[in-house]
Amino acid sequence: MNYKRLYIPNSIIFITIVTSKRRNILIKNIELLKFSIKNAHKYYNFEIYAICVMKDHVHLLIKPNNINEYSKIILLIKRTFSKKIDINAIVDYEQSESNIKRQERVCRSGIA
């Protein structure tokens, strides 16, 4: 998607992050979500004003010190959560054909 973002210095940003296919995985993985937010906070300087977690999405109110980094903050939260979640625990998880092919190439190359 092509988002239009406003970068207004010294502003508080309202962010909504939705799970893929609106899967109900956030409450079950609340510790991982907290870790993902803390991890982003380690790399980017921002204040957290509020967090509201529902089963399939999360709302955040943050104030980044550098307004140009707020999309990077979102990216790091999502990336950390996605990389560390146990996909075997997701009932309706299906790997895409491209992911399956990529894993096959990695296995054939002996990297896995």
Image (tube, helix red, strand yellow):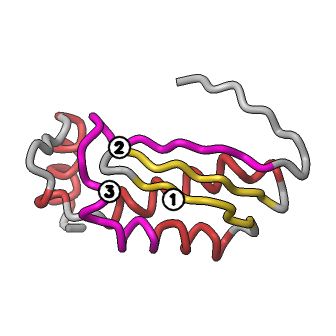
State the residue at coordinates (24%, 43%).
23
86 left or right, relative to 36 = left
Residue pointed to by mark 2: 19
* Disc 1 secondary structure class: helix
Give the x, y percent position of residue 76.
55, 58
Give the x, y percent position of residue 94.
13, 41
* Disc 3 secondary structure class: loop
Task: Using the image, tell me which numbered label, if any, was put on residue 26.
Answer: 3
Question: Which residue is more in the foreground, 86 or 53?
Answer: 53
Q: Amino acid at mark 2?
A: Thr
Q: Which residues are magenta?
A: 12-34
Residue pointed to by mark 1: 77
Characterize the local packing of mark 3: few (<14), some (14-19) or many (20 or more) Cα atoms within 10 angstroms.
some
Q: In whole angstroms, how far apart are the C-alphas of marks 1 and 3?
A: 13 Å
Characterize the local packing of mark 2: few (<14), some (14-19) or many (20 or more) Cα atoms within 10 angstroms.
some
Res. 27 image quadrant: bottom left
